[in-house]
């Protein structure tokens, strides 16, 4: 389940909402509004036309009903529309799960004052509706029929509408699953593209130091053969330093690959976590003369992942400082509608607007003059952690100079 606006959406409600999203609905209307909608899918249009033939009435419609609104996702004999649930005829009795058949709706006290009956919107007399009920009893809406004249519905016709209502539910669920499959396929293709790009970058970044290691190893071998032991010692020193850089890169890649996996949320104190991170970064903080200010916020998150996120952001603010200017790092926090929001601002070099999306990709480095070496995985790791919490990471600027990194942690934080 997921939550929105304080309420809980079940699997069936997500199917219902996905159906509405699939037909590209306009902005919801308030009470009294009547908004035209696009025609439904060909499958739904065929079924609603068949319903009109079965019941021999001039108008039929498939209605999806939410907490506030009624949406006609397909109709025959009229243009589909959206109205408030308060004005909907179908909303009156659809949750009972039973069909409604009225020879004259104006004589039924439940419907006589409805705007589609009393002349404000229409003058419907004959009215019939069959609930759209899923296998586990959730009512999505109705299949309805109507006319301006009084009328009747035979038992075979009612049975035909009920069979069609069941078919409509199957089609709605099938279309939902098809959209999910298409989304999953699109995500898989995007992931494969990122994986290929990631592999290309890592192979490039590892090939250069490997070439260097092999080159100096050959020089060391030649020097040893010629008796130049001093040169060989220097070559092996270079090989050792290069190897250690490669090992650090491999460790960064492995850490990135496991980021956001097994989350174990706990109640955390932001100021306490920052104090621990600053202690871990002790030498870098002292050498740079960094001033770090932090607000307090209690929030729910995985302590290991949050420690990695904060350490990366604070380390970046120190590493990418402006020459001769001690870093000033401010960590603010607040609780927004969607969960905890953290902001880390600094007075450093900043990141150009054109690069702010790109630097969130793995192994992307800007290669600016004076920038320290790195793996290009720090911000990508932070973005991945934010996504694992159901949130996102955004990069902005600070007036004057610097960077603002905003981390939205999602509704559970």
Image (spheres, grey):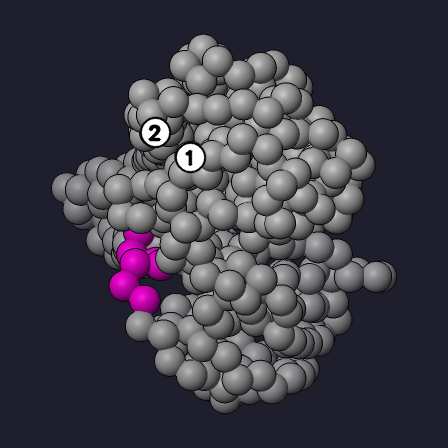
Q: Residue furthest right?
A: 400
Name the mark on residue 187.
none
Say few, some or many: other residues with alpha carbon within 10 Å of mark 1 (under 14 / 14 to 19 / 20 or more).
many
Can residue 248 be seen by looking at this rendering? no
Q: Position of residue 219 (x, y in %)?
A: 26, 40
Q: Is residue 284 above or below residue 4?
A: below
Q: Secondary structure at mark 1?
A: strand
Find residue 180 and report its image quarter. Answer: top left
Label 1–label 2 contact, CB within 8 A: yes
Count the numbered circles shown: 2
Q: Residue at x 57, y 71 (%)?
A: 340
Say few, some or many: other residues with alpha carbon within 10 Å of mark 2 (under 14 / 14 to 19 / 20 or more).
many
Q: Specify whether 376 is left or right of 303.
A: right
Q: Secondary structure at mark 2?
A: helix
Q: Which residues, given as a range, are shown in magenta?
A: 257-263
Q: Is residue 153 above or below residue 396?
A: above
Front residue (pair 382, 131): 131
> Where does label 2 land, which residue?
162
Q: Position of residue 113 (x, y in %)?
A: 71, 46
Can residue 135 be seen by looking at this rendering? yes
Task: Give the dominant element type of the magenta stretch: helix, strand or loop.
Answer: loop
Q: Residue at x 31, y 72 (%)?
A: 264
Q: Residue at x 45, y 11 (%)?
A: 53
Q: Specify whether 51 is left or right of 124.
A: left
Q: Position of residue 358 (x, y in %)?
A: 57, 41
Front residue (pair 101, 107): 107
Q: Is residue 338 above or below residue 268?
A: above
Find residue 212 and report its image quarter. Answer: top left
Q: Earlier in the sequence, mark 1 or mark 2?
A: 1
Q: Specify whether 219 is left or right of 346.
A: left
> Where does label 1 land, which residue?
130
Q: Is residue 260 magenta?
A: yes
């Amino acid at each position: 389940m997921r939550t929105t606006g304080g309420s809980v959406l079940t699997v069936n409600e997500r199917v219902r909402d996905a159906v509405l999203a699939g037909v590209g609905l306009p902005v919801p209307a308030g009470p009294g509004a009547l908004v035209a909608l696009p025609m439904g899918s060909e499958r739904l249009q065929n079924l609603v036309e068949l319903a009109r033939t079965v019941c021999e009435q001039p108008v039929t419609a498939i209605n999806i009903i939410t907490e506030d609104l009624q949406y006609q996702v397909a109709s025959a004999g009229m243009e589909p529309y959206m109205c408030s649930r308060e004005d909907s005829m179908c909303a009156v009795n659809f949750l009972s799960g039973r069909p409604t058949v009225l020879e004259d709706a104006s004589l039924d006290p439940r419907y006589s004052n409805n705007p589609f009956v009393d002349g404000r919107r229409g003058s419907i007399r004959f009215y019939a509706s069959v609930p759209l009920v899923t296998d586990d009893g959730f009512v999505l809406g109705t299949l309805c029929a109507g006319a301006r004249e009084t009328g009747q519905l035979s038992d075979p016709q009612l049975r035909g509408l009920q069979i069609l209502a069941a078919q409509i539910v199957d089609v709605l669920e099938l279309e939902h699953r098809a959209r999910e499959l298409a989304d999953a396929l699109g995500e898989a293709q995007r992931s494969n593209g990122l994986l290929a790009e990631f592999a290309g970058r890592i192979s490039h970044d590892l090939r250069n130091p490997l070439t260097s290691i092999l080159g100096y190893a050959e020089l060391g071998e030649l020097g040893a053969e010629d008796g130049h032991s001093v040169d060989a010692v220097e070559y092996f020193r270079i090989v050792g330093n290069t190897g250690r850089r490669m090992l650090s890169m491999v460790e960064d890649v492995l850490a990135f690959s496991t980021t956001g996996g097994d989350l174990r949320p706990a109640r955390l104190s932001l100021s306490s976590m920052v104090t621990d991170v600053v202690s871990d970064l002790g030498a870098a903080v002292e050498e740079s003369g960094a001033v770090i200010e932090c607000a307090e916020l209690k929030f729910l998150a995985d302590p290991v992942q949050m420690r990695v996120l904060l350490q990366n952001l604070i380390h970046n603010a120190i590493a990418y400082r402006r020459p001769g200017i001690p870093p000033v790092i401010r960590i603010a926090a607040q609780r927004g509608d969607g969960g905890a929001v953290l902001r880390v601002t600094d007075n450093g070099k900043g990141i150009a607007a054109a690069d702010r999306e790109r630097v969130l990709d793995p192994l992307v480095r800007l290669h600016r003059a004076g920038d320290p070496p790195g793996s290009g995985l720090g911000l990508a790791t932070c973005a991945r952690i934010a996504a694992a919490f159901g949130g996102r990471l955004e990069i902005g600027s600070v007036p004057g100079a610097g960077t603002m990194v905003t981390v939205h942690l999602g509704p559970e934080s």
